[in-house]
Image (cartoon, rainbow, N blue to C red):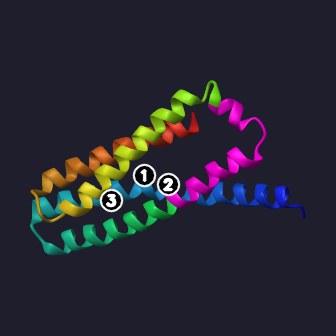
Amino acid sequence: MDSIGSLLHLSALGIYFHAVFVSLTLGLPLVIISLLYKYSRASEEKYLNAARVATMVLAVNFALGAITGTLVEFGLVQIWPGTNLAIATFAFAPLALELIAFANEIAFLILFIVTLGRVKTMYSILILALYWVFALFSGLLITT
């Protein structure tokens, strides 16, 4: 198998892995928000502890998603014909906005992780909800 064929298969495989990580990235915040809401109502530490564990899973998942997403983008640019032309023309605006959304996603995730358990629970829920909105926006733009 030639090197271009190998890169193409690797890029395609990366897309599948990235899709799994994106799915978890969009679903886990809803689980964490539910756990934090339950914690705010019941004041039982088990809900906060479960939210912390789910947050660790989200952080690792996000990192793996960022890695596979970056590899997929390099694969698109390097081996898929026409990608550079598309990026230079009609795809420029959605990809530029996606980069802004992704940067905000990172910022709000870090803010959430650092402040979890240190600020009022409703503030944590709000921060994570903002993260989730930027994650949805990022996903929408990257598929555009």
Question: Helix, strand, or loop for circle 3?
Answer: helix
Q: Looking at the picture, does residue 62 appear above or below residue 143? A: below
Q: Looking at the picture, does residue 27 appear above or below residue 118? A: above
Residue 62 locus on image (x, y percent)? 44, 60
- Could you tell me the amino acid type at mark 3? Val
- Could you tell me the amino acid type at mark 2? Ser
Segment colored magenta = 66-87
Q: How far is disc 3 from disc 1 in space, using C-alphas?
A: 10 Å
Quadrant where the C terminus lies?
Answer: top right
Picture disc at residue 31: 3
Q: Nearer the viewer, residue 74 or 129?
A: 74
Identify the residue at horizontal 50%, vertical 57% (top origin): 66
Q: Can residue 107 be seen in the rendering of this structure? A: yes
Q: Which residue is mark 2?
A: 23
Residue 38 locus on image (x, y percent)? 18, 61
On screen, residue 16 versus residue 56, left or right, reads: right
Question: Helix, strand, or loop for circle 1?
Answer: helix
Picture disc at residue 87: none
- Could you tell me the amino acid type at mark 1? Leu
- Mark 1–mark 2 contact, CB under 8 Å? yes
Tag in front: 3 or 2: 2
Identify the residue at horizontal 67%, vertical 31% (top origin): 86
Q: Nearer the viewer, residue 71 or 134?
A: 71
On screen, residue 108 versus residue 79, left or right, reads: left
Q: Looking at the picture, does residue 73 appear above or below residue 91? A: below
Q: Which residue is mark 1?
A: 26
Q: How far is disc 1 from disc 2 in space, using C-alphas?
A: 5 Å
- Mark 3–mark 1 contact, CB under 8 Å? no
Q: Residues within 10 Å of mark 3 (few under 14, many from 20)?
A: some
